[in-house]
Image: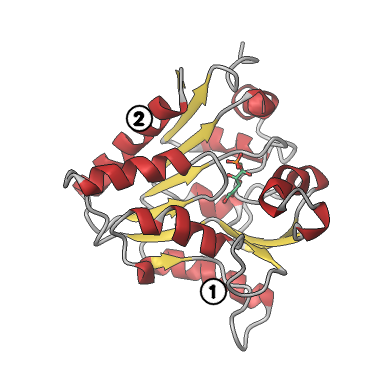
Amino acid sequence: MNIVVLDSETEIATRMTDEIQAVVTRKPEANLGVATGSSPLAVYRELGKRIQVGDLTLAKCQAFALDEYVGLPLGHPESYRQTLLREFVSRTDLNPDSLFTPNPHLEGKTLDEAAAAYDASIKAAGGVDYQILGIGSDGHIAFNEPGGTLDSRTHIGGLTEQTRRDNSRFFENNLDEVPTQCMTQGLGTIMEAAQIGLIAMGSGKAQAVKAMIEGPISPDCPASVLQNHPQVTVFLDRDAASLLG
Ligand code: F6R
């Protein structure tokens, strides 16, 4: 793992966007793997800036989301599809039709079938060229919570109490409003991305970051599976890096 510790969110966003720009310059029709949550927001703003000044275009790219809540009505503003349209697509020149998200509302399919179809669609598109990741305070990536298998495919999962509490800020701090289930790319799916960049900021992530980088590869810290990936950069601020030896 390539570990990069930087002073600010702006520097982290600049460095990750540099990596994404290099991928898209080499391959204009690249498939980007996109995350929701707070960690990648500055990257989406930085991508938007570079597109505005003509340094970059995502016009030929496709984007695949990591995960989606199960149980929110179609079009709910905090669904990951709507979040990505708002925070990512609207800031860039990606065609909105080129954003793909796990779809729990797929007509004529069970949730398990919809999950398998999403997994297959990533493969059919040729796989993800650059995957943006955050990490949960319990060590999850996408919504792969501790205790699962390290080679899972896109599946229906449950959200831990800790993750639901962490995410309740998007639901007016009302825990009852936070879904208990999700459809998420599996760890095996994520590991097939050609290149991965993970962002962690703040002391609340320090324990998970230590387990990811220095701990054993174990389902107890799902992000630790990234130790087996050949091309991962972990971008940390000083607080998130504070427990590293
Ligand atoms: C989001 C996702 C999650 C987040 C993680 C960190 O699509 O898959 O794994 O990346 O929960 O969230 P933030 O960035 O809000 O701290």
Q: Is residue 176 above or below residue 107?
A: above
Q: Which structural element holds mark 2? A: helix
* Within-10-Å neighbours for mark 1: few <14, some 14–19, many 20+: some
Q: Is residue 134 visible?
A: yes
Seen in the image, is 159 located left or right of residue 128? right
Seen in the image, is 103 located left or right of residue 176? left
Q: Is residue 215 visible?
A: no
Q: Is residue 126 above or below residue 190?
A: below
Q: Earlier in the sequence, mark 1 or mark 2?
A: 2
Residue at position x 49%, y 69% from top? 120
Gap between marks 1 and 2, in whole Å?
Answer: 33 Å
The image position of residue 107, as x and y in percent, is 60, 86
The image position of residue 73, as x and y in percent, is 67, 74
The image position of residue 229, as x and y in percent, is 48, 38
- Residue found at the far bottom of this picture: 108
Proximity of marks 1 and 2: CB atoms separated by less than 8 Å: no
Quick one: 139 or 85, which is closer to the camera? 85
Mark 1 sits on what residue?
A: 117
Mark 2 sits on what residue?
A: 15
Mark 1 or 2: in front is: 2
Q: Amino acid at mark 1?
A: Ala
Query: Which image quarter holds the C terminus?
Result: top right
Residue 60 image-quadrant placement: bottom left
The image quadrant in which ligand 1 is located:
top right
Q: Is residue 182 above or below residue 110?
A: above
Seen in the image, is 199 located left or right of residue 139? left
Quick one: 175 or 226, which is closer to the camera? 175
